[in-house]
Image: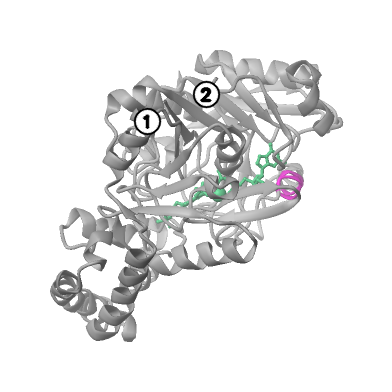
């Protein structure tokens, strides 16, 4: 069967940790969208692994697949594989021949366009994700399979590179270097193709996964980013360029919707909210310069809010895995989660970072929004309307810090009562049961209520 792991908010909900937790029972872990914009952290035996492209299951020695819905930067791919090998692991990574390749000009154009966009910039990771998906939709992309055939690669590059160079130079007025040079790109990417072939890494993703399922293997589908960063269901244009939602798992792997729907879809929820990037955030506490819209450092937000935001940011280590940027933080946003539960059809929830909120006197949640004088319970479809929403808060009594590792061993009832009240509120509102509760970053720091493979 399949278990699909989906971020329910704005990324960094702790998906990597949950993949690692349940990954024990999985044989294959496949990513279905995104590229090296992701930053998934797995903490195993005190060692921390930060993966941006290779599926998190690689840390447990599972077969890792980059599905056709992913965009693959071969440089990152081989760097990560080599780093894991240096650390004594033997990652077995396969890449869909239908996946698109991130080329150096995509990265260059990502940076150029972000600077140009000003208020419309999403604050991207500048990994070339958007420009690569643009070329995919524009039918001028280079696919992983094309790297295996030098003639096809040459033909693709000769068509597309002059256009990209003209775009950079003539539209944006930038100087260009070897990232826009056909011969340089051809040589470099042909070599990547040779390595992919030598290590027998490429697959026809859908049929590869289906065969494993038919043979009785457990497959896990690892989403990157989160529902509100989804290009269709998120806070456009402050989104990524792919579909982290569960529908992306079928399109991005080649497994049928009935196969995915027959399995479990687990929503990963951070017990509060974090956001790296721009756009509105109705439950935000304080703000971060350069990311919070209209943030004025001299004027400042409410001092207590700033203090609380700093506390949560430091306790939760809320600094971007990929870019190191301080993340914006806020209270849990229930309208956002209701939207996610519906868009993904969650069959279960993993709520992480309950430990980070421990020690606060009270914990708030944005239960609904006030929007143009009305109370609404889910996100409006336009981001401008979302920006006009004001959160209506409910307050929960806080819980104290306990020995979380011991709680993880003793089970759900060892979680402080007030935290359980909070968790049960979330489960009730989203009409999905709690499968796991994250009480710390390590593999052993999760209270497992349900194992989806059992
Ligand atoms: P992902 O992108 O969804 O995989 O999440 P990230 O790895 O970017 O960010 C989650 C961060 O929180 C990582 O540093 C994790 O080690 C850490 N983490 C995950 N779950 C928990 C938890 O329950 N408690 C605490 N304190 N940290 C957690
Ligand atoms: P994981 O998988 C949090 C954000 C960026 C930016 C927007 C678009 O670790 O949860 P992109 O580079 O994708 O074009 O940027 O999306 N973003 C993420 N935020 N976690 C992520 O991944 C993210 N991947 C992209 O900050 O606002
Ligand atoms: Mg992350």
Q: In the rendered image, which residue does mark 1 sit on? A: 215
Residue 369 percent across, percent down from the top left: 50, 26
Q: Position of residue 254 (x, y in %)?
A: 27, 39
Query: Which residues make up the magenta segment?
Result: 310-316
Q: Which residue is mark 2?
A: 453
- Which of these two is toward me, 452 or 128? 452
Visible in this render: residue 173?
no
Q: Quadrant of the N terminus?
A: top left
Specify which label sits upstream in the sequence, 1 or 2. Answer: 1
Q: Is residue 381 visible?
A: yes
Q: Main secondary structure of the magenta part?
A: helix
Q: x%, y% of residue 45?
A: 74, 47
Distance from disc 1 to disc 2, alpha carbons, whole Å, reads 16 Å
Circle 2 sits in a helix, a strand or a loop, which is it?
Answer: loop
Numbered disc 1: secondary structure = loop
Q: Is residue 195 left or right of residue 365?
A: left
Q: Is residue 260 above or below residue 44?
A: above
**Mark 1 against mark 2, which lies toward the viewer?**
1
């Amino acid at each position: 069967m399949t278990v699909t792991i989906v971020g329910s908010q704005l990324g960094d909900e702790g998906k990597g940790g949950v993949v690692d937790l349940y990954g024990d029972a999985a044989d294959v872990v496949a990513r279905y969208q995104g590229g090296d914009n992701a930053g998934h952290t797995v903490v195993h035996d005190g060692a921390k692994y930060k993966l941006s492209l290779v599926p998190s299951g690689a840390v447990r020695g599972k077969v890792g697949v980059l599905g056709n819905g992913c965009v693959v930067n071969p440089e990152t791919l081989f760097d990560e594989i080599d780093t894991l090998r240096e650390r004594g692991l033997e990652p077995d990574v396969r890449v869909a021949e239908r996946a698109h390749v991130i080329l150096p000009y995509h990265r260059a154009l990502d940076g150029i366009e972000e600077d140009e966009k000003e208020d419309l910039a999403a604050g991207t990771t500048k990994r070339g994700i958007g420009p690569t998906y643009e070329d995919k939709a524009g039918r001028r992309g280079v696919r992983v399979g094309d790297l295996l055939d030098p003639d096809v690669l040459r033909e693709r590059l000769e068509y597309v590179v002059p256009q990209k160079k003209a775009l950079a130079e003539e539209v944006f007025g930038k100087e260009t270097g070897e990232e826009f040079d056909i011969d340089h790109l051809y040589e470099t990417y042909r070599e990547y193709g040779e390595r992919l072939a030598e290590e027998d890494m490429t697959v026809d993703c859908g049929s590869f996964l289906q065969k494993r399922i038919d043979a009785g293997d457990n497959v896990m589908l690892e989403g990157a980013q989160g529902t509100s960063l989804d290009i269709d269901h998120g806070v456009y244009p402050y989104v990524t360029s792919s579909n982290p939602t569960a529908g992306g798992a079928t399109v991005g792997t080649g497994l049928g919707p009935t196969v995915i729907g027959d399995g479990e879809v687990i929503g990963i929820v951070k017990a509060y909210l974090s956001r790296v990037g721009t756009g509105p955030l109705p439950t935000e506490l304080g703000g971060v310069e350069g990311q919070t819209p209209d943030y004025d450092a001299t004027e400042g937000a409410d001092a207590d809010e700033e203090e609380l935001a700093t506390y949560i940011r430091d306790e939760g280590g809320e600094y971007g895995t990929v870019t190191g940027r301080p993340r914006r933080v806020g209270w849990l946003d229930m309208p956002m989660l209701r939207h996610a539960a519906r868009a993904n059809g969650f069959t279960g929830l993993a709520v992480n970072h309950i430990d980070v909120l421990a020690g606060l006197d009270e914990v708030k949640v944005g239960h609904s929004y006030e929007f143009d004088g009305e109370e609404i319970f889910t996100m409006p479809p336009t981001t401008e309307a979302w920006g006009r929403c004001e959160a209506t808060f409910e307050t929960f009594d806080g819980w104290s810090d306990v020995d979380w590792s011991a709680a993880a061993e003793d089970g759900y009832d060892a979680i402080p009562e007030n935290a359980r009240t909070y968790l049960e509120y979330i489960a009730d509102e989203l009409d999905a049961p709690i499968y796991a509760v994250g009480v710390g970053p390590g593999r052993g720091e999760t209270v497992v209520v349900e194992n989806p493979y059992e």
